[in-house]
Each structure stands twice: as structure tokens, then as C-alpha cells.
Amino acid sequence: MRGTRPLALLSALFASATLLTSASSAAPAAACTYPAEVLSMTRWKVQLPVDDPAQSGTQVLQILRPRLNTYVLSPWFKPNSACDGVQFRNAVNGVKTPNTTYARSELREMQTNGTTEAKWSSTSGTHTMVIDQAINHLPNTKPQVVVGQIHDGNDRSTFRLDGSALYITRDNDTHYKLVNSNYVLGTRFQAKFVVSNGSIKAYYNGVLQTTIPVTFTTGYFKAGVYTQANCDNSSPCDTSNYGQNTIYNLSVTHS
């Protein structure tokens, strides 16, 4: 009889462990609805390749805070299924911003109030953007996308994928610095810009690739996907033909 109590205790412990294991394995996967649950949108507004129904004529849809905090538009701007990244997609037939050739699904830097557009100088302070991202899809015929920009009315520097070749650009030189000659779609990489003392330092996976002398006073960062193809040079002219990028982490600092 003395042996029955230890056996009963062991059985109870085993049953408890089984219940705990079952509960653990049944735990729900991460769930999210809005991109702002994955990435901080404090410094951004989003520009999307669809028409804004609130504006007269055809104009790009722009979403600012606080609306951006609870905004999603599938498939153009949404969390991925793992809720660890935000998907940016743009089709070749997307609505374009004024004076541009191509459409985009892209974040545009704002001041911390979320409603005033950011503008800063390349010769004053230090301005840094870091993007942890993976390019997932390219348009047909002209397989090119931009996935990170310094802009001031012109593309001062970008990360640009042309087929399998990933470049850092300088002004209109789209092949200025090759950083990866064999990029595989879906591969995560870190793109980093540091602007200070009249120059842009561009890093790929933490390694400095180039330093570009430049002077401007109205700079800002952009991140997402800016598809370098449209219905004039890529077919079919519909939403099945697109560029796509996923951003896992995004940070901007000014000092």
C-alpha cells in the first residue's frame, strides 16, 4: 500500500505535464490587422497606387496619422501572415504621383507630429534610415524596383534592384554602385543611409559601400516599393504584374 501513493503522485504529475504541453502547442499564432501594429508609423505617411475617392480627378491615395494607425489596404499595404513584416505592393497600372513615370506603395517621412512633411539638410545634423527588408516580386519585362530612397525633389540615392543586380544609385546614375550581383528574391538584407557633413554614406548589410558628396536642404526618406515599370513598357497592364517588398524593421533618427 505504501507504493500506491508515489505512483498516484507520478500519474498526477504526468497528467499535468501533458495538459501544459497541449496548452502550449495549442497557443494561437501571432495575429495582427494593421501595418502600424508591426512597424512604427510615427514618422510616416503612406502613398498608395490607388485613386483617392475623396479628391476630384485621379490622385494618389495618401494616408496620414492618426488614420494610419488603423489603416490597411490589401494587397498594397498590409501585414504579412507572420505579423513580423509589412507588405508593400505596386502594380504597373497603379495611380502615380504628379510628375512621375511610375507608381508606388511607399512611406514618406514626416515630422513627429505625423502631419507635417519632413525636410532636413545634408550639411546640418546627422540623418539615418535603416531598413531590414526583402524584395519578393518584380514586374515583367522591366524587372526593376526601388526599395529605399533619399529624396529632395530628386532621387539623391536609392537601393534599386535590376533583375538580380542590386545597386546603390546616385542622382540619375541608376547603376552607380553594385552591391550584390546575384540577389535572390525573398532574401532579407539591411539597407542603411547616413547623411551628414555634406555626404551620403550608404551601407549594405552593415558594410559601407559608397560615400556620395551632396548638398541639399529639403531632404527626406522614403521606404516601401517604387516599381520602375508601367503599362508602356511592361505587360500585362493589370494588377497581376507588380513589384513587392516586405519591410521587417524600419528606423529613422536625426541628431
Image: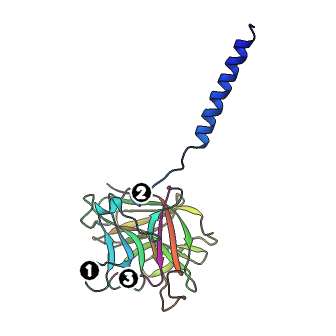
Q: Note whether 213 is above or below 175 in the view shown.
A: above
Please name the residue shown 39% across and 59% down the image: 128
What whole-number distance in Å separates the C-alpha atoms at marks 3 and 1? 14 Å
Amino acid type of disc 1?
Gln
Asked which secondary structure carries label 3, the reply is loop
Decide which of 48, 128 is in the foreground and name it: 48
Main secondary structure of the magenta stretch:
loop
Spatial CA distance of label 1 from label 2 is 28 Å
Q: Which residues are magenta?
A: 82-97
Q: Residue 200 appears at what percent x and percent y? A: 41, 66
Residue that badge 1 annotates: 55
Query: Disc number at residue 84?
Result: none
Q: Residues within 10 Å of mark 1 (few under 14, many from 20)?
A: few
Most foreground residue, 253 or 197? 253
The quarter holding residue 163 reads bottom right
Q: Which residue is mark 3?
A: 96
In this rendering, is residue 192 above or below 141? above
Q: Is residue 63 left or right of residue 93?
A: left
Residue at the outermost bottom position:
232
Quadrant in which the C terminus appears:
bottom left
In this figure, which residue is indicated by the disc labeled 2?
39
- Residue 141, quarter of the rendered image: bottom right
Q: Nearer the viewer, residue 96 or 10?
A: 10
- Where does the image place residue 190, in percent across and percent down from the top left? 52, 60
N-terminal-most mark, 3 or 2: 2
Q: Is 224 one of the magenta-colored residues?
A: no
Q: Is residue 246 left or right of residue 111?
A: right
Residue 164 found in image quarter: bottom right
Q: Identify the mark nearer the N-term, 3 or 1.
A: 1
Indicate which label's residue lies in the foreground, 3 or 1.
1
Residue ID at (41%, 69%):
73
